[in-house]
Image (spheres, rainbow, N blue to C red):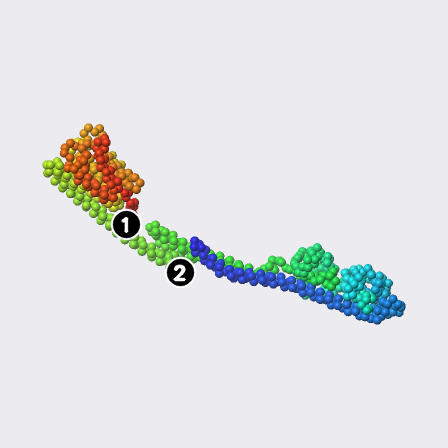
Amino acid sequence: MPHWSLRTKLVMVAVLALLPVLFLSGWRAWHDSRQTQVRRADAASAVAEGAASRHRELVEGSRRLLIAACTDDAVRAALESAATAADVERCEGYLAQLLQRFPSDYSALVGIDDKGVARCASSPSARGMNFSDREVFKTARQSHNFTIGSYIASRITPRTVVPMALPIMLDGQFHGMCALGLSLRSMAEQLASPQSAGSAGVALVDRDGAPLGGDPRATAALPVPSRLSAAIAARQFTFADYGQNGATYDFAVRPLAGGTLFVIGAIPADRSLGMLLADWWEFALIAVASAVLLAALWLGADRWCVQPLRRIQEFAGRVARGEAGALEAPPGWAPEMTSVGARVSEMAAAIASREQELKAGLEQRDHMLREIHHRVKNNLQMISSLLNLQAGEIRSPRIRRFFGDAQNRVLTLSILHRHLYERSSWSLVDFQQFISDLVRQISVARPGIERPQPRYTIRAPIMAVGPDLAIPVGLIVTEAVGRALNHDFTGVAVPEIRIEAHEKGEEVELVIEDNGFEPPGPAPVGAGPGGTRGSFGLTLIRGLAMQLGGEVAIGERPAGGTRVVVTFPMPRDETEGGADG
């Protein structure tokens, strides 16, 4: 984040501020969507539960009807082995009277003895039929309780019925039973009526998922039987799936008494885009508004912050490069940015004014320093001329030579000051050019000596050095070259004075050597080979080498001549700008 732009940071802060709102609105939309699904599932469950309760009422009514039949004396008398035709007739009349109120709901009401033979029935055609092979008879005889069997085709009427039986017990022994066939169609119609409000519906199915009746809407909405039977087998009482009509529904399954019939409540589960928008429209609205806000923040920050700051930055860059110009704020800038731009313009104007003052001061200082160097050079040249005039009146060659050495030393300083005011930098000189001019002036300033003039070989690195290094090196060269010019080059094929300076690691090695011979005559007191030790010039060279922080070695060359080697540390890098400052 430290390297992000201002615009990115503003947008990220806005994103962090909007995240809680988006999270809460998303959670609320998800919660509302889940609540809608739960309500649909609850509605399907309520419809199925209502149908199951109506079934329980129907079963309870059937059970009470069987109790009324089984407890009547006429029915019990008809089941006796010694029953007369009159007993059977009374029994059938009573049973027929019981079913008069439910002509379409039940197929027949039958009294069956302990052998499974129908002794009397509401329909005379059922008399004498054997029901011992029926599952309901076997279950009632074994359980001694009210029993509901699987739906079967009736032997008495052309209907599919759900058989119900209530055993007749005498002294704890099974004495027979009363059986009742509940019409499956009638039961399905009663389960689905009254129909639920809205789009919910109820259907009746068996354990294999086959529809047996019910609300036509629910029947058409049922899934394929294999899916429905799998849900029943897994006791998955609520689930969502596609109906056979291609729509999506929420289903609720409730088992009915007997365990072979199930009631299915179905309610449409709308998964369309419209329903999705109905649940998520608030979140979508907040998300779109947040996106618009972030886009507006991004564009606004670019328009009112980034672009003005970039323009101010470009103007500051031009000012730093010394380019002239003015910062004009466009009309669309915010007051704060306009104020910042005005302050930057004022600062640029103040910097330009101060820079002009500094340039004027530097030019004046450079002019004064060059003038000082020029005047010092002129004064030194005047002293050199006076020494030259004075030397003309001296008759002693030895004293005249001393004057010449002093004149050369003054000339060295004069040449140095000339280089200082002629260069663009008043504090640095070109080392190689300085040595070359110095040697040329020394050779020109020694007229009247009838000896072969040597040639000069000068090899020095091209580098700028300050007066602290140039003066000692110049005086060393002056002393060494002056002494070499006193040597005798008669008989030397190629008289030469060689001056070389080169870098050796962190040091500079200055070598001055010639191939002449020491002239005949008495050597100075304490002089060694070559007449160099103990002289003033040698003392001066050693002192200057110490001033440079280096060492000096003076000796004779094997082929003739003298070799002076001065080693001193490499001068520190100095730039023209740094020297001027």
Q: Answer above or below: position of 526 versus 135.
A: above
Residue bearing mark 1:
581
Occupied quadrant, residue 162:
bottom right
Element assignment for label 2: helix
Pointer 1 local density, CA inside 10 Å: few below 14, some 14–19, many at least 20: few
Name the residue type under label 2: Pro
Residue bearing mark 2:
335
Pointer 2 local density, CA inside 10 Å: few below 14, some 14–19, many at least 20: few
Residue at left offset 22%, top offset 49%: 368
The percent coordinates of residue 151 (x first, y second) are 77, 60
The percent coordinates of residue 365 (x first, y second) are 24, 50
Name the residue type under label 1: Gly
Identity of the residue furthest to the bottom in this view? 73
Q: Name the N-terminal-most of marks 2 and 1.
A: 2
Occupied quadrant, residue 260:
bottom right
In the picture provided, is 533 more to the left or to the right than 155? left
Residue at left offset 26%, top offset 50%: 362
Residue 10's mark? none
Q: CA distance from mark 2 to mark 1?
A: 41 Å
Occupied quadrant, residue 90:
bottom right
The percent coordinates of residue 567 (x first, y second) are 26, 40
Residue closest to the eye, 549 or 497: 549
Asked if residue 439 shows in the view, the reply is no
